[in-house]
Amino acid sequence: MNEQAYWEAVQNRDSAYDKQFVYAVKTTGIFCRPTCPSRRPFRGHVEFFATADDAQHAGYRPCQRCHPTLDTIPDPHSDVVMAICRYLETDHDHIPTLDELGDQFSMSPYHLQRVFKRIVGISPRQYADSYRQGRLKTALKAGISATDAVYDAGYSASSQVYSGDILGMTPITYRTGGEAITITYTIVPCSLGYLMVAMTLRGVCKISLGDSEDDLNADLIGEFPQADITRDDDRLMPFITPIIAYLDGHHTHLNLPLDISATSFQRRVWEILRQIPYGETRSYDQIAMLLGQPTASRAVARACATNPVALAIPCHRVVRKNGDLAGYRWGIQRKRVILQIEHECISNTSCACGTCHHVSKTDSSIRLNSSGASSNG
């Protein structure tokens, strides 16, 4: 045990040593991580241990600031952020402003906003707005009248909801599960199993990949149980044809008209996803940075997971920081295949799409059969 190096690490709060040792203070009976924010003790009062267990066996207690017995260090602002969340969830006649929150929790508005976004991934206003959207949808599904649900959820005017920005449809229509909405759809076999495209009069509302027609049918009906849903293969052929061409390895731009609802955060994430070039990927952290919210990677992942239109919003192009594939709403194997299709298209010198910048030829090694299983095992 190099105590001189350990002592220098304690003085410098060097995180590189955070799991190599703990130090205990004889005068207080407490042991800490090297990075503990507490005031530095005198060298003569310090004793070093290889593990937290060793320090506890020697009679020392773990510090309540740096939590040396835990694998990860709790954020010191977690409790106050949790309190802010609970406060935002209580009834208000308006969404509390940053100044009001700062007064309530004795923090400067700027510091409160920064801390909240670092931990939660979105701003206090976005959190409050998302929460009241959830209250509205729950109330409508429970059969509460549209007027009561709108005002009970915290909206100051029904026009905020009837604009369609919150639900993608009027509250009454949402409450009835899509009643009075006409949806047409088609399902075709493809290299990834089965592909479904569904449309309202305004645009494509759902693009799904699945293992069977029955599964895709059940999913569509479950989302819009009261809608007038009919199959119309001919009408949707112009919309499904470019998607099939895309899956066949053609660099096709899927600029389809969309009719999907989204929160403001989801909308921002999805717009960034649509800007990722064909054949390229971005990490969740990179998307969060582009949003101006570098700690919002988990919120970005949630926005990707709720994307209702596969391929049109290319959430498959988002990967982990180290390049590994994360989850995918339609199966991680499909995500792997889609990325490979794009890679092969831009690198295959014999590609027929005519729009790629060719570099070299690669061989196809993964495809899905009609059941969705990998054909190469």
Image (cartoon, rainbow, N blue to C red):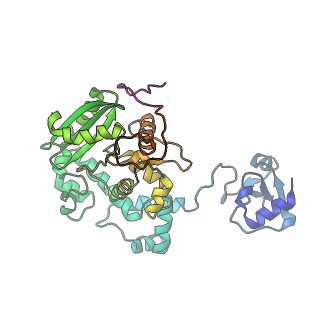
Relative to 48, 339 lies left or right: left
**Residue 106 visible in this rendered orientation of the protein:** no
| Residue 230 on image: x %, y % | 15, 34
| Residue 106 on image: x %, y % | 49, 73
Residue in front for this viewpoint, 353 or 97: 353
Residue in front for this viewpoint, 349 or 144: 349
Q: Is residue 372 magenta?
A: yes
Query: Residue at the front extreme?
Result: 350
Q: Is residue 31 magenta?
A: no
Region in magenta:
366-377
The relative height of residue 125 versus residue 52 in the rendered view (above or below) is below
Residue in front for this viewpoint, 367 or 230: 367
The relative height of residue 235 versus residue 171 in the rendered view (above or below) is above
What residue appears at the point 39 percent right and 53 percent down from the top-left corner?
A: 273
Relative to 161, 90 lies left or right: right
What residue appears at the point 53 percent right and 43 percent down from the top-left corner?
A: 324
**Residue 347 visible in this rendered orientation of the protein:** yes
Relative to 181, 72 lies left or right: right
Q: How many marks?
A: 0
Q: Based on the displayed image, in which of its 4 quarters is residue 102 positioned?
A: bottom left
The relative height of residue 217 versus residue 274 in the rendered view (above or below) is above
What residue appears at the point 76 percent right and 68 percent down from the top-left corner?
A: 40
| Residue 334 on image: x %, y % | 41, 35
